[in-house]
Image (cartoon, grey):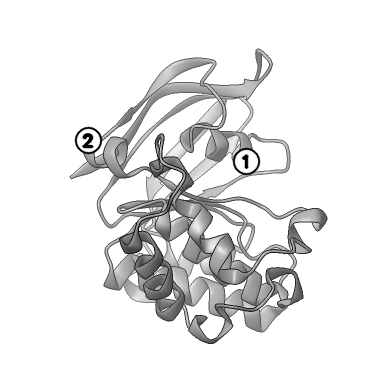
């Protein structure tokens, strides 16, 4: 099933195009890695897919499932966010914020989902800990749990291993791979780690100026 289609997309800021000619689609279970030089528009594309920026031209077509349940978004963290003084539970629960509507209260089912997602990512023992006191790798797991609360079928991630030590980065890639293979979550991820791209991705989207190349990762079957 096709979850998302980009047709001749142009993305940018304040009317200034950064990347154009972007056409690809994401099926259920796909793992798409976005690669390219700095400034090629990778983060801008991810933010546009997540609905944080409007396309400058072209279109993004979402499946009914994505329209209903949303897209899980894991952005790059700022220094201020890393010291955020909320509990792990509160941070993950905020992933349901867009579903509250006019009600100021979170449903019991949302709170149970928070606990389930933390357990899934091995963070259940940290539920009452202060988010700002966690290590970088632990914080990324918490933010991944939050993104899972926002999504049913698709995660989009902007360099989720930036700033992590090699072991934590390896664990993060392994977790995302597990979500993709065991839960069937589709993934769109920006990565500069070409070895991990070749190991995990089913497809690669290369951005560069006014060109975008989308191709199947032929090494996928033998590397995973």
Q: Earlier in the sequence, mark 2 or mark 1?
A: 1
Q: Nearer the viewer, residue 35 or 134?
A: 134
Q: Nearer the viewer, residue 16 or 156?
A: 156
Q: Secondary structure at mark 2?
A: helix
Residue extending farthest to the front is: 104
Residue extending farthest to the left is: 1
Callout 2 environment at 10 Å: few (<14), some (14 to 19), or many (20+)?
A: few
Residue extending farthest to the right is: 79
Q: Which residue sits at x=37%, y=35%?
A: 24
Which labelled disc corresponds to residue 43? 1
Where residue 155 appears, as percent x and y from the top left, is 43, 53
Q: Which residue sits at x=74%, y=64%?
A: 85
The answer to whether 179 appears left or right of 146 in the picture is: left
Q: Secondary structure at mark 1?
A: helix
Callout 1 environment at 10 Å: few (<14), some (14 to 19), or many (20+)?
A: many
Residue 27 visible in the snapshot: yes
The answer to whether 69 appears left or right of 17 in the picture is: left
How far apart, in angstroms, are the residues tagged by discs 2 and 1? 25 Å
Residue 89, by quadrant, is bottom right
Q: Tell me the mark number nearer the camera, choosing from 2 and 1.
A: 2
Residue 197 visible in the snapshot: no
Where residue 110 appears, as percent x and y from the top left, is 37, 60
Above-or-below relation of 61 to 151:
above
The answer to whether 192 appears left or right of 175 in the picture is: right
Above-or-below relation of 42 to 58:
below
The answer to whether 106 appears left or right of 127 in the picture is: left
Q: Which residue sits at x=44%, y=41%?
A: 98
Query: In which quadrant will I find the C terminus?
Result: bottom left
Q: Which residue sits at x=62%, y=44%?
A: 36
Above-or-below relation of 148 to 120:
above
Residue tagged 2: 64
Above-or-below relation of 4 to 121:
above
């Amino acid at each position: 099933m096709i979850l998302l289609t980009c047709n001749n997309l142009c993305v940018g800021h304040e009317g200034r195009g950064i990347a154009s000619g972007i056409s690809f689609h994401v099926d259920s279970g796909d793992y798409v890695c976005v690669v390219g030089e700095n400034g090629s528009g990778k983060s801008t594309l991810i933010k546009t897919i997540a609905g944080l920026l409007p396309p400058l031209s072209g279109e993004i077509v979402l499946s009914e499932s994505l329209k209903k349940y949303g897209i899980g978004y894991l952005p790059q963290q700022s220094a201020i966010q890393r010291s955020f003084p909320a509990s792990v539970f509160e941070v993950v629960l905020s992933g349901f914020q867009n579903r509250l509507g006019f009600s100021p209260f979170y449903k019991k089912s949302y709170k149970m989902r928070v606990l389930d997602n933390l357990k899934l990512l091995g963070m259940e023992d940290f539920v009452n800990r202060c988010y700002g006191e966690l290590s970088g790798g632990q914080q990324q797991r918490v933010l991944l749990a939050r993104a899972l609360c926002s999504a049913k079928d698709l995660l989009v991630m902007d360099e989720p291993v930036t700033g992590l030590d090699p072991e934590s980065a390896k664990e993060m890639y392994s977790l995302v791979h597990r979500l993709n293979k065991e839960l069937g979550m589709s993934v769109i991820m920006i990565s500069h780690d070409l070895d991990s791209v070749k190991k995990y991705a089913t497809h690669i989207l290369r951005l560069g100026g006014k060109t975008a190349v989308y191709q199947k990762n032929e090494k996928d079957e033998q590397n995973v």
